[in-house]
Amino acid sequence: MRWSYAPVLALAIFAVGCSKTQPQAAAASTAPAPAKKLNIRPAGDTEIQPDMSKIQNEDLKKVFKYIDDHVDDHVENLQKWIRQPSISNSGEGIPESAEMVKGFFEQLGCQQSTVYDVGITEWGAPGNPVVYAKCDYGAPRTIAIYWQYDTMPVTQPDAWKQPPFEANIVEQAPFKKVLIGRGAANSKGPEMAYWNALMSIKQVTGKIPVNLIFVAEGDEERMDVGLRKFVKDHPDFFKGADALIGEGGGQSPSGGAGVGGGSEGCVYIELTTSGPRDSDHLRNHPIRSWAKSRFRCRR
């Protein structure tokens, strides 16, 4: 099991937030590594490691080491979150999950962390709560980070190799250790890697080099109805953000990794054309073929 996405995010945050003045490293960064509990190997079977020779920032090297030394703790954090159901379509665990996410942001030291009741959406149904947080570290730049805390329902529990809310770690070829659970890949796994990386940066350096704005919705799996209303009602909450990081990202077995920008919701386009009424002509018309392949609802 390899949580390389956390170092990728650490690199991205340091790249945006670098400055001439480096914060003094916290004493805890030199503490001995904790005892192994899950025996997670940070480099996995592939022995993929960041090329430290290309990293000039000494604090960032310490952050990478801290992440590897505490990888068992980071996986346990994900297991706790997976074990909390958060199914937007049924509402199961939604209020508890929103409070859990609020607690994550408070642990980062965010001065503001609030669960908002978005009320009735434009479709007539109530939206699930949105968790908003603002973390001012006195940095020159601010990054907005999008999360979703809801997941899809479990419609076929018998089809699961492991119970969906136990977050068991098992062997599954070609990997020695795989964590199985609802939301492990979409999207609690990547988001917890974000959080683990940010907490590691703070633990090592004493602060995070950029200010943060979090928005975490509980309606991603049902067309973002609550998020849409929240953003329209509170556009001022996002003033001053220099960039947006989405929920996606990760690392392939070959070593390739990335951090997503992010976009949410659907784009609806109505295309009106004119031409001959001959059905055979229209069926093969290049504009029609292009429109079919180009204009789709992207989520």
Image (spheres, rainbow, N blue to C red):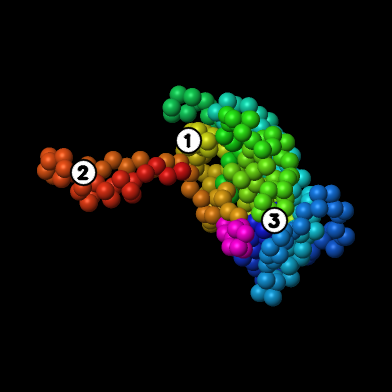
Disc 3 marks which amino acid? Answer: Arg
The mark nearer the N terminus, 1 or 3, is 3
Label 1: which residue? 223
Is 265 left, or right, of 167 in this rendering? Answer: left
Residue farthest front in this picture: 173
Q: CA distance from mark 1 to mark 3?
A: 31 Å
Q: Position of residue 242 (x, y in %)?
A: 53, 57
Q: How many labels were placed on the picture?
A: 3
Label 3: which residue? 2
Disc 1 marks which amino acid? Answer: Met
Q: Is residue 108 visible?
A: no
Q: Position of residue 28 (x, y in %)?
A: 84, 58
Residue farthest top in this picture: 124
Mark 2 vs mark 3: give the one in front. 2
**Is 169 within the magenta?**
no
Callout 2: SS: helix
Give the residue at x 23% y 50%.
287
Give the residue at x 15% y 45%.
281
Disc 2 marks which amino acid? Answer: Arg
Callout 3: SS: loop
Give the residue at x 16% y 40%.
279
Instruction: Classify 10 Å Cα crowding around label 2: few (below 14), some (14-19), many (20 and above).
Output: few
Is 263 left, or right, of 75 in this rendering? Answer: left
